[in-house]
Image (cartoon, rainbow, N blue to C red):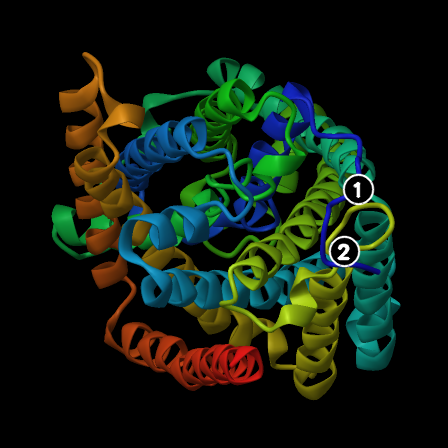
Amino acid sequence: MSVTPLPRRRKLGPLMATALVVGNMIGSGVFLLPASLAAFGSASLVAWVLTATGALLLALVFARLGRAYPRTGGPYAYARRAFGDFVGFQTAWGYWIAVWVGNAAIAVAFVSYLGYFWPALGDTALLAAGVALAAIWLLTAVNVRGVRQGGWIQAVTTVAKLLPLVALAVAAPFFIDAGDFTPFNPSGQSTFGAVSAAASLTLWAFIGIESATVPAEDVENPERTIPRATVIGTIVTAAVYILGTVAVFAAVPRQVLVDSTAPFADAAAVMFGDWAGTAVAIGAIVSAFGALNGWILLQGQVPLAAARDGLFPKVFARVSRWGTPAVGLIVSSVLVTALMLLNYNASLVEQFNFVILLATLTTLIPYAYAAMAQLMLMFTDRERFSGRRLALDGTVAVLAFAYTLWTIAGSGYEVVYKGTLLLLAGIPVYVWLKHRDHHDTAEITRKAA
């Protein structure tokens, strides 16, 4: 293994980059969301539209930054360039934690859906943990062998997961009745409160907007591919989410939907028969597996970029003979394994609702930094941002930042409190890294003298 130079490797093309964006956003959560949103009625569709609008603003930010700075690291690379080492480290630290914690949640969801066909997984915690860890390490091995191998899995699983969702969306008009969307807000809250609460639930479904920017140096023609993959991927995902939710609302009565554990499968069974429910359950398994693959692909990229800059331990800068960040991939999967073995019990699924909120928060903060990084770099690096779109780029950055603040506030006091502690816990690591660099520099100076 070596730190530099990076060996030549096959890269992600436009299809694979777009599949990475779509596949990382359409993971396990969307297949359960309609049941959670049923309590808010049609007001949840307004929440979907608002969340999709905010996601598109962030997508435009990442598209613009990805075109201007096609460098591995995504949000980390932009924050460090705009604000320096400390904010760059905070971004890398928070994002890395969010990725591997989120991978544990996705692995649990994968096993949960697999239990539809293999009931023993729901009865034996050890068996369920073993299957989840087998999936994690299988996909880790695939991504160690090369980013393109992971990209092929992502492309195939993205197509497979889209098929049942698109089929439901296309069939929805034949089942829609005006009564399916009344009352507008049965939650008992104000309309604003209901929309805000529903929006907080839909937020996790859009995490992954930045996916194509993170492995930028492994993307073909990144200045062109990254912006297109990011924007197209976000638009496709938003359309699938909204139309899919409409389809479920149209097919399943709200009173039934509230208690459903498989809302898309229930809707498919109503529309096409029991066989369709089974097909959607298979789609949910494929979706979770594909999302796990996509996020494992990313879990080594940000530590690699930060380590190259001296903001993560040097070992994370090592790459395999296939040019992949093997150390980052393996260390991250070890942490996922430890988390699952220490906590995998009967109540783990309920606990993961809070873990997912924490992972969302530690992702949103890098999003906020990225939005402001674009504004900062527009002033400090005018050559890359000059042109007629300058005012539009600035407006998009400000609106995207405002959106992230709204969603962070909507996470709740407890999540913000604990998430902030989690981010602050990384500061001693930063201090140690800077001390090490200072010591190395002093030693070199002493020897030179």
Quadrant the N terminus occupies: bottom right
Q: 366 and 244: which one is in front?
A: 366
Q: Are marks 2 and 1 in contact (CB under 8 Å)?
A: yes
Task: Report x, y in % for residue 77.
Answer: 44, 49
Check disc 1 and report its element: helix, strand or loop: loop
Amino acid on which disc 1 is placed = Pro
Task: Report x, y in % for residue 305.
Answer: 56, 54
| Residue at point 60%, 41% (across, down) | 215
Does residue 315 sit above or below 59 in this rendering? below
| Residue at point 73%, 43% (across, down) | 281
Please indicate whether residue 4 sits to the left or right of residue 435 in the image. Answer: right
Q: Quadrant of residue 385?
A: top left
Residue that mark 2 sits on: 319
Check disc 2 and report its element: helix, strand or loop: loop
| Residue at point 43%, 29% (across, down) | 238
User: Local crowd at mark 1 within 10 Å, few (<14), some, or many (≥20)?
Assistant: few
User: Local crowd at mark 2 within 10 Å, few (<14), some, or many (≥20)?
Assistant: many
Distance in Å between CA atoms under marks 2 and 1: 9 Å
Please indicate whether residue 106 sits to the left or right of residue 10 in the image. Answer: left
Residue that mark 1 sits on: 7
Please indicate whether residue 116 sits to the left or right of residue 214 in the image. Answer: right
Return the disc, 2 or 1, that comes first in the chain's sequence: 1
Does residue 394 sit above or below 191 in this rendering? above
